[in-house]
Image (tube, rainbow, N blue to C red):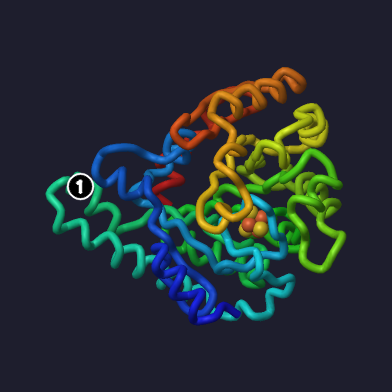
């Protein structure tokens, strides 16, 4: 488990610890949205209100991969989920409590939109994307159920290597499931993601990508770094051509958190470079680049450009 020293370090970085292995971190865009300054790309692409979104993890700082661009300290990790024992109900209640505690302080500030700040006290969305891999948590399906019971939507981001959990999620689907495709080929994956315990995971990722056709809303994410995994768009296009996802996001990795020790600023692709790479994939598979958020260096591709990407009010209200 995490040392006390590491927990203190994470708290200094803005993490609020929930129970024994979960946390939230209020993201920059949530705070910017309260001030009416900006919203995050999930707001732009899918209609998720940034100021009502909880950025969270149930596997704090722990993953079975050690990607070079990860903002975790990749000296920590696990392939075994048995240490994640907290109950889903306690975790979700802890998320809401900590989220409110952090944002309550904004009531003392004059530079906010009061209506939005009031709404933050009733969060509507949980993004399990902060750090670590959510699929390591054995009770992930129950956690998703609990989030939905509280009338919130859920986005779950996973590296796709824990295929048996992806299969379980078919019967308890998050509002949107993301799988990251971290490389254009197995050799690059093994070199850049360095799975704990050796040569495994690539075939699992491919199998998980095939499972996406069983879900209502899915996204594939490419997190790109120059000289690491941002080459051979033809191979990414080939892997993805027959997979049943709805959305494809290409995003620049950022040298933040512990990634600063493994990634140089010069390796971070610009928005224009991300866009060009995306356009090549679109050209090959005849897909459409439908939206972009230059401030976050992220673009959205769809097979057909339809309005279905925007979460409807009735979903957001249930
Ligand atoms: S899969 Fe995600 S959390 Fe795990 S090491 Fe890679 S970037 Fe970090």
Residue drawn at 25 percent across, 39 percent down? 36
Q: 89 or 232, which lies in front?
A: 232
Q: Is residue 73 above or below residue 311?
A: below
Horizontal arrangement in the rendering, residue 280 relative to residue 37 (left or right):
right
Secondary structure type for disc 1: helix
- Residue 112: image x %, image y %? 19, 46
Q: Residues within 10 Å of mark 1 (few under 14, many from 20)?
A: few
Horizontal arrangement in the rendering, residue 117 relative to residue 290 (left or right):
left
* Residue wearing tag 1: 115
Residue drawn at 54 percent across, 75 percent down? 21
Horizontal arrangement in the rendering, residue 118 relative to residue 43 (left or right):
left
- Ligand 1 found in image quarter: bottom right
Q: Is residue 17 above or below residue 67?
A: below
Horizontal arrangement in the rendering, residue 40 relative to residue 256 (left or right):
left
Total marks placed: 1
- Work out whether residue 158 can be spotted: no
Ligand 1 lies under 8 Å from the Cβ of mark 1: no
Position of the N terminus by quadrant: bottom right
Residue drawn at 85 percent across, 59 percent down? 200
- Residue 6: image x %, image y %? 51, 74
- Residue 227: image x %, image y %? 71, 38
Q: 317 or 123, which lies in front?
A: 123
Q: 12 or 279, which lies in front?
A: 12
- Residue 4: image x %, image y %? 49, 81
- Work out whether residue 153 can be spotted: yes
């Amino acid at each position: 488990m995490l040392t006390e020293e590491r927990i203190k370090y994470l708290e200094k970085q803005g993490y609020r610890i929930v129970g024994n292995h979960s946390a939230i971190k209020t993201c920059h865009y949530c705070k910017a949205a309260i001030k009416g300054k900006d919203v995050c790309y999930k707001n732009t692409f899918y209609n998720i209100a940034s100021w009502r979104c909880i950025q969270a993890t149930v596997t704090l700082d722990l993953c079975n991969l050690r990607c070079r661009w990860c903002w975790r300290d990749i000296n920590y990790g696990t392939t075994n989920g048995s240490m994640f024992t907290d109950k889903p109900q306690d975790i979700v209640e802890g998320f809401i409590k900590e989220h409110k505690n952090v944002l309550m302080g904004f009531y003392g500030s004059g530079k906010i939109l009061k209506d939005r700040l009031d709404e933050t006290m009733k969060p509507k969305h949980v993004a399990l994307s902060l750090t670590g891999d959510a699929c390591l948590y054995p009770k992930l399906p129950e956690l998703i159920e609990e989030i939905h019971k509280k009338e919130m939507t859920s986005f779950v981001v996973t590296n796709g290597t824990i295929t048996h959990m992806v299969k379980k999620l078919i019967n308890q689907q998050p509002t949107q499931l993301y799988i990251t495709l971290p490389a254009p080929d197995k050799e690059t994956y093994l070199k850049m993601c360095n799975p704990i315990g050796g040569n495994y995971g690539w075939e699992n990722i491919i199998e998980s990508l095939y499972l996406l056709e069983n879900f209502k809303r899915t996204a594939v994410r490419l997190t790109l770094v120059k000289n690491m995994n941002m080459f051979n768009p033809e191979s990414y296009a080939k892997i993805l051509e027959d997979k049943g996802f709805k959305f494809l996001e290409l995003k620049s990795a950022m040298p933040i958190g512990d990634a600063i020790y493994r990634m140089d600023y010069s390796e971070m692709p610009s928005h224009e470079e991300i866009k060009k790479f995306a356009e090549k994939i679109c050209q090959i598979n005849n897909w459409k680049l439908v939206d972009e958020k230059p401030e976050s260096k992220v673009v959205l591709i769809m097979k057909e450009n339809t309005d279905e990407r925007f979460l409807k009010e009735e979903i957001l209200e249930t």
